[in-house]
Image (cartoon, rainbow, N blue to C red):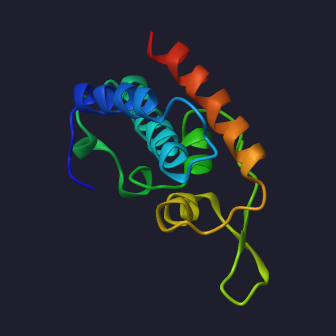
């Protein structure tokens, strides 16, 4: 991850949240909201630790695993394992750190509604935490 400031993370959180608003049936919009959650959680970590840059975070904080970041902030994991449809037609469980890849490449998520709901709840929680 490129080192970024707390201000850049907060701007990215707000930009991705705004860009992803609307119908989250669209993979691109849901992907932006997932990225917004990741930026927001990392911004909250910086705030909690009184750091101004991600350069001060440990390697295990620089992850796409949103449940891991939630645990670091004292929260409980919110994302179930993600079920995707593989190329051979079989379903496969993947961890939340693969969610952005599935959305980026258009892999079908079988529990899209549940994921969308969790993402929206986390966005609201992060907004409160950043005030």
Residue 5 locus on image (x, y percent): 21, 33
Q: Residue 50's image quarter? A: top left
Q: Is residue 1 left or right of residue 40?
A: left
Pick the quarter of the image with the N terminus: bottom left
Q: Residue 123's image quarter? A: top right
Residue 88 locus on image (x, y percent): 71, 90
Q: Is residue 113 left or right of residue 41?
A: right
Give the total number of marks visible in the rendering: 0
State the residue at coordinates (42%, 49%). 61
Question: Which of 63 and 96 lies nearest the eye of the viewer?
Answer: 96
Depicted 108 relative to depicted 91: above or below: above
Depicted 7 relative to depicted 70: above or below: above
Question: Which of 106 and 75 lies nearest the eye of the viewer?
Answer: 106
Pick the quarter of the image with the C terminus: top left
State the residue at coordinates (27%, 42%). 54
Q: Is residue 78 left or right of residue 122?
A: right
Residue 37 locus on image (x, y percent): 50, 37
Question: Which of 99 and 95 lies nearest the eye of the viewer?
Answer: 99
Question: Which of 30 and 74 lies nearest the eye of the viewer?
Answer: 30
Among all residues in the image, which is located at the extreme top?
Answer: 131
Depicted 12 relative to depicted 69: above or below: above
State the residue at coordinates (48%, 50%). 28
Q: Residue 18's image quarter? A: top left
Among all residues in the image, which is located at the extreme bottom?
Answer: 88
State the residue at coordinates (51%, 29%). 21
Residue 121 locus on image (x, y percent): 67, 28
């Amino acid at each position: 991850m490129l080192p970024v400031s707390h201000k850049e993370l907060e701007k990215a959180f707000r930009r991705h949240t705004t860009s992803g608003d609307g119908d989250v049936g669209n993979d691109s919009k849901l992907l932006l909201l997932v990225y917004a959650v990741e930026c927001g959680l990392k911004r909250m970590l910086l705030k909690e630790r009184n750091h101004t840059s991600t350069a001060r975070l440990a390697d295990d904080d620089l992850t796409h695993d949103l449940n891991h970041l939630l645990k670091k902030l004292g929260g409980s994991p919110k994302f179930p394992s993600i079920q995707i449809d593989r190329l051979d037609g079989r379903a496969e469980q993947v961890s939340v750190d693969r969610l952005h890849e599935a959305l980026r490449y258009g892999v079908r998520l079988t529990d899209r509604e549940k994921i969308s709901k969790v993402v929206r709840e986390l966005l609201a929680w992060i907004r409160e935490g950043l005030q």
